[in-house]
């Protein structure tokens, strides 16, 4: 089986897998990185949202052979030694309910704040509208993004 090498949360990893295996399965089942969640598996719920070279992407629809030589960041690699300011804002605003979608929500929020450091409600709604939360924590998500932007 071919081996694919990429950077995951700052460390070089090499995995043997079929080239068309979605990265979400590589992360969760081969590398044991379970922050990105499996929700829909077809790129529509946002539960798996992570970063590819600093931009939000959906590992459930990204074949592993497409990330060779690239930087993949999951929620596990977001804060370095401590919490990322967006994670801290999530705690302060008590955003999570069941919590399942929240790693993806946070990764989407971080990507938004990189391009819109002081986002409007419309910016937040546009950027976050494809990250689904069945508990309906959207109002607190918006508050946490605004808190992190301060
Ligand atoms: Fe990837 Fe739903 S599991 S978008």
Image: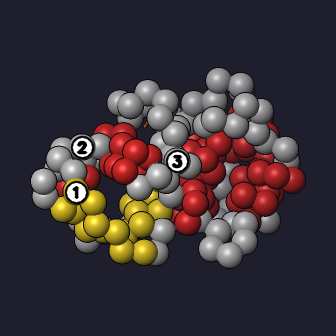
Where residue 86 appears, as percent x and y from the top left, is 71, 59
Image quarter for ligand 1 equals top left
Q: Residue 149, can we see it?
A: no
On the image, the x and y values in percent for residue 82 come to 72, 71
Q: Are marks 2 and 1 in contact (CB under 8 Å)?
A: no
Q: Residue at x 38, y 31 (%)?
A: 41
Q: Which sits in the foreground, 137 or 119?
A: 137
Indicate if the residue with disc 2 has its beta carbon within 8 Å of ligand 1: no
Judge the density around disc 3: few (<14), some (14-19), many (≥20) Cα neighbours within 10 Å.
some
Q: Between 140 and 8, which is closer to the camera in this rendering?
A: 8
Rendered position, 126 above or below 65: above
Say which label, 1 or 3, has the lower sequence index: 1
Real-space Cα separation, disc 2 to disc 1, in angstroms: 10 Å
Q: Quadrant of residue 77?
A: bottom right
Label 1 crowd (10 A; few <14 / some 14-19 / many >=20): few
Residue 78 placement, left or right of 139: left
Q: Which of marks 1 and 3 is in front?
A: 1
Residue that badge 1 annotates: 16
Residue 21: image tag: 2
Badge 2 element: loop
**In the image, is the residue at mark 1 within 8 Å of ligand 1 by its beta carbon?**
no
In-image side of 101 versus 44 (left or right) = right
Query: Can you say whether 86 is above or below 20 in the image?
Result: below
Colouring mode (rainbow / by chain / secondary structure / one colour) = secondary structure
Whether residue 116 sits left or right of residue 71 in the image: it is right
């Amino acid at each position: 089986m071919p081996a694919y090498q990429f950077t995951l949360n700052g460390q070089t990893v090499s995995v043997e897998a079929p080239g068309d295996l979605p990265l979400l399965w590589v992360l969760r089942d081969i590398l044991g990185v379970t922050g990105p969640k499996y929700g829909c598996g077809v790129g529509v719920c946002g539960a798996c949202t992570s970063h590819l070279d600093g931009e939000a992407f959906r590992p459930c629809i990204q074949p592993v052979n497409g990330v060779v030589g690239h930087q993949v960041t999951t929620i596990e690699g977001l804060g370095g030694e401590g919490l990322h300011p967006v994670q801290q804002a999530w705690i302060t605003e008590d955003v999570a309910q069941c919590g399942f979608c929240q790693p993806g929500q946070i990764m989407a929020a971080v990507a938004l704040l990189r391009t819109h450091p002081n986002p409007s409600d419309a910016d937040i709604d546009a950027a976050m509208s494809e990250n689904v939360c069945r508990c309906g924590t959207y109002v607190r998500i918006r508050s946490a993004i605004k808190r992190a932007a301060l």
